[in-house]
Amino acid sequence: MVSEENLLSDILNNSPSVELLKQRNREIIVLFLYKTFYRHREPVSYEVLRRNLVDYLTSANLENDEENDISVFDSYEEKAYKYIQRWTDKGFLRNYQEESGEVFYELSSYTSKAIDWLISLKREEFVGTESKFMNLFGQIKELVEFTNEDASERIRMLEQKKMEIEHQIQSIQAGESAVVYEEYQVLPRFRYITQTAKELLSDFKEVEDNFKAITKSIYQKHAEGDVSKGEILGFTFDALENLQHSSQGKSFYAFWEFLMTPSLQEKWDEMVNDLYSSIDSKQIRQEDLFLRNMKGYLYNSGKKVYQANDKMAEKLSRIICESGKSQIMASQRVTQDIQALLLQLAAKNIRPDISIELETEPEIALPIERKLTLEKAVEITYDKVLEVAEGDIAEAQHAESLFANRTIDREVLRLRIAGALKRRKQISLPEVIEENGGLEKGLSELFGYISVVRKFRHHIHPERTQTILFNAEQQKSIVIPEIIILR
């Protein structure tokens, strides 16, 4: 059993949360991470993160940071690149690659908890002692009730509840006013609920980190080379069973099942809408709308847990399907040795400067280049005189199409999509086109939209289709896969 003193010592010396607060430029770092990730709770692509960080460091006029190997001679592009690398290595950020190959970043559970803790330190206008005590009282009462196995005592508690509810009903039917919370009772409860909801996201990230830790252990055991496939499988199943039967695992799977139940989702939406409507009707000031989007945040975080689980299963499948041929085994042994060395360096937080040197001469291939030859070029002599056509070119049926100017300004299309995403979190491509009056320049404008979509987060669903009208006069349309653009 680890003592609390040793536990605190380990946290102070090894926790990324504490390491974040130890940084000399912690104010700049924490404020940027809060502004970029904590407010919106959504992953950010590498390009967007780098661009935002360059702008932020420029406005902050940050010159050097020896702690993160950033000097005054570095450009702001180089400073942003180094910061992103350091924050990922130190555990402040974590990244993952989507199916499209694009890399996205989000806060680690350590950074989320550090910011949660910092926000909890702010001085409130008033301390809701009444709400805190009533919440404490209610939780103690609930624990007492649901830890009591005496059937007669449980019946007595339920009868008491029943009497209290009947008394309230009779009082209201008799014309008495129902008990309604005042502002000093509403605000602290609302803040407590919102803060607890935000902490749930950190809990989800911890479960995901546990799955990733199991995957990392599989890599380590496989890199050692002297461990059989059966032993790796046994280790994995034992680790998964321990995780699923732990308090954290049971809590996560129970909550995920709750989150996936349609009736409970509808009930949650209904309660949240009623809560905000009630607060608005009482003209109570509150700017935190986190609860409105909480279900989506939790779903995305929970989905990443299952993706981490899938990645672990994929690694196991690859290990099981490995061939035993001698040449393959030899190359695997070399790869395992390299992995073992890299894992040792990673445990010491050392980032090696590794490169590959090719000993062969480069092969140059220029297939379209004019070839060298000693043969003389054949001269072509034209001996026929072209006849002048009758009529005017203006009378040609397709002359208008030949000289029509149908230049597509992709920047205009990009601004249209960006404007639509300011009003909505996600939108389909046909909705963007419809909001802007349809396609004026036919298929070329549609293809322009499709090329611009790649600059935004998007999902393409080949199994679903969308019909887009590109010629209103002739009622011509085209069917394409469903394209959903995300903020």
Image (cartoon, rainbow, N blue to C red):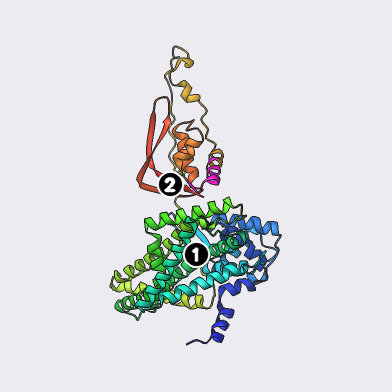
Q: Which residues are magenta?
A: 416-426
Q: Which residue is mark 2?
A: 367
Q: Nearer the viewer, residue 351 or 389?
A: 351
Q: In which quarter of the view is residue 261 placed?
A: bottom left
Q: Nearer the viewer, mark 2 or mark 1?
A: 1
Residue 215 shows in this picture = no
Q: Position of residue 6 (x, y in %)?
A: 55, 86
Three-letter code, disc 1: Leu
Q: Position of residue 284 (x, y in %)?
A: 61, 55
Q: Is residue 142 magenta?
A: no
Q: In which quarter of the view is residue 479 placed?
A: top left
Q: In which quarter of the view is residue 411 placed?
A: top right
Q: Which labelled disc corresponds to residue 377?
A: none
From this view, report whether residue 459 is shown above or below residue 397: below
Q: Which residue is mark 1?
A: 201
Within 10 angstroms of label 1, few (less than 14), some, or many (20 or more) residues? many
Within 10 angstroms of label 2, few (less than 14), some, or many (20 or more) residues? few
Q: Residue at x 60, y 74 (%)?
A: 19
Q: Position of residue 461 (x, y in %)?
A: 38, 48
